Image: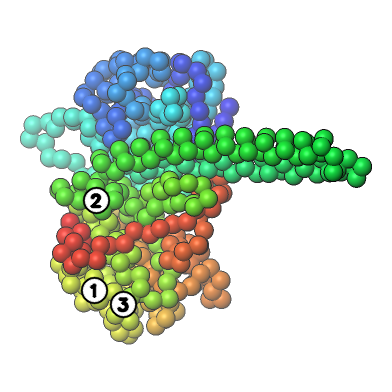
Amino acid sequence: MIQLEAGQNIGLTADIVRFTARTAGAVELGALAVGEDLRVRDELGHVSAARPAAPGVRYAGDAVELTLTQVGADTHAVLLYVVAGQVLGAVTAALAENGSPAAEFAITPSAGESALICLEVYRRGGGWKLRALGQGYAGGSAQLLSTHGVPVPVPAQASAPTQTAPRPAAPPASGIPLEIDHGLQRMWMIFEDAARSAAALVSARDYATKRLDQEMSEAVSNPATRNTPAADAARAAAQRRYDELVALADADHRRDSDQLGLEIAEADAVMPAALASWLAPAWTTRAQRADGIRLGELYALDRGALRVPYCVPVPLNRPLWVDTESSAAASRVVGALLARLVAALPDKPTKVDLIDLSGGLRGLAAPLAPLLAGPVISDHSDISARLGELAHAAELAEIAYHSGQAVPPAEHRILVAADFPHGYQASDVVHLGQLMVRGDLIGLSLVVVGSGGTEFADGALALLAQSCRHLPTIPGTPLFDPWTGNPWELDLDMLPAEPELQARYLRM
């Protein structure tokens, strides 16, 4: 039996699978049969004690059973959850295939969650796969169900309960941070498939090259026969086998890439603006909440024309560091990040704190004016006060969180620290480090713009640099995918140059 970690997925081979969960206290199990938008088509897609069956999904008291060949064709995934009348402790979710244990996933909620999506069974490439999720909801079953499109009746004359924003459990220290949920999940599934297809191509090419070298060496190993027709024929046959292997690998990869390209185009047409390309329909309609933002496109020239959107969660679970010697040169990259961060959470007021010592981002100040939390900081002596204010707010929020008095952030704060680290004091670096750790408690997304890497001598500065997600602005700088370790280049999105478009995107 496989022990899953958050975000990990495995293939399913059986037709009948059974979901169970172990935890202290009483819980109820349920399932949501959802479409590609991760919302149910109607209330029949919700399987629970009150609605015990849907096509291919059956509530069985202490378990939920799926018969995958009977699941509705319009069902993209089945989300398997637990809910309780109290705060959940540690939960171990298990899945069996045809009665045999297949996988377990241990989840430790940490923010008072009383509802938890444990596992997702989803379609992929004509088959089915299982993914470990662990998405918690402090608002209980009402928040979980409403998030996925299930109507939740509100009792007459009853006020809506205050909901505490879920604070996902920290990922395993040796694992990859959880980067999936809703629209973001779809983008990362595509990225994973692209990564595995690329790995198969690279592996096949390497095998073909090694085989060619070996057979060529054997053909000329005997001095007495190396210049004979037989040796020539052996070399020709070796080259022919190499060409056939490479052609087959290229064809398989091209087929995969064509399919993924179609999936990307389909996704772009329905994604919220924060996850979509600039020309997507979402940028011309009312903004919709997103769980992530798009940073740009990943590609590899030696692996074909496929370009895969690269997306990350929002509010940012890791600060973004735009690696550049010139803020002015990267201003349109920063503008694109800001536009998508603003668009991601339209249901919350957004405030932007902008530190711009060199004036390289001055072109963004005017369209951002309605969102600025205060004057743009252009003098290094003003940095400490602004960062201290934010760090103090995060510290108070952490105290409230640990005392059980936490409330969801009422706003989305975006801090852009440009021209870093020049002009910043040691205390400013400490404050940025504190915001990196606690910023999510005040809804903060942190973007650092400046030169540097991970080799700083200063301990606090080195830790901050190592903890950020670095976005290279110099072509040829590789990024490595987390599944196969193959290199990709990142073509960062840039805010359109036209002033009227900049104003529209930045204020969406």
**Mark 3: amino acid:** Gly
Q: Where is residue 24 in the image (x, y as percent from the top left)?
A: 44, 31
State if disc 2 and disc 1 touch (CB < 8 Å). no
| Residue, disc 3 | 360
72 up-or-down from 186: above or below: above
> Left or right: where does residue 90 sit relative to residue 339?
right
**SS under mark 2:** loop
Instruction: Tell me residue 507's x, y (percent).
Output: 17, 60
Q: How far apart are marks 1 and 3 (CA)?
A: 8 Å
Dot 2 amino acid type: Leu
Look at the image and tell me whether residue 23 can be seen.
no
Q: How crowded is mark 3: few (under 14 residues within 10 Å), some or many (20 or more)?
A: some
The local secondary structure at tag 1 comes to: helix
Query: Which residue carries the number 2 mark?
Result: 279
- Residue corresponding to mark 1: 363
Q: At x 22% / y 29%, what residue is drawn? A: 150
Please name the amino acid that badge 1 sits on: Gly
Question: Alpha-carbon neighbours of circle 2 within 10 Å: few (<14), some, or many (≥20)?
Answer: few
Camera-side residue: 412 or 420?
420
The answer to whether residue 163 shows anywhere in this view is: yes
Closest to the observer, 141 or 253: 253
For the point 29% across and 29% down, which residue is it? 35
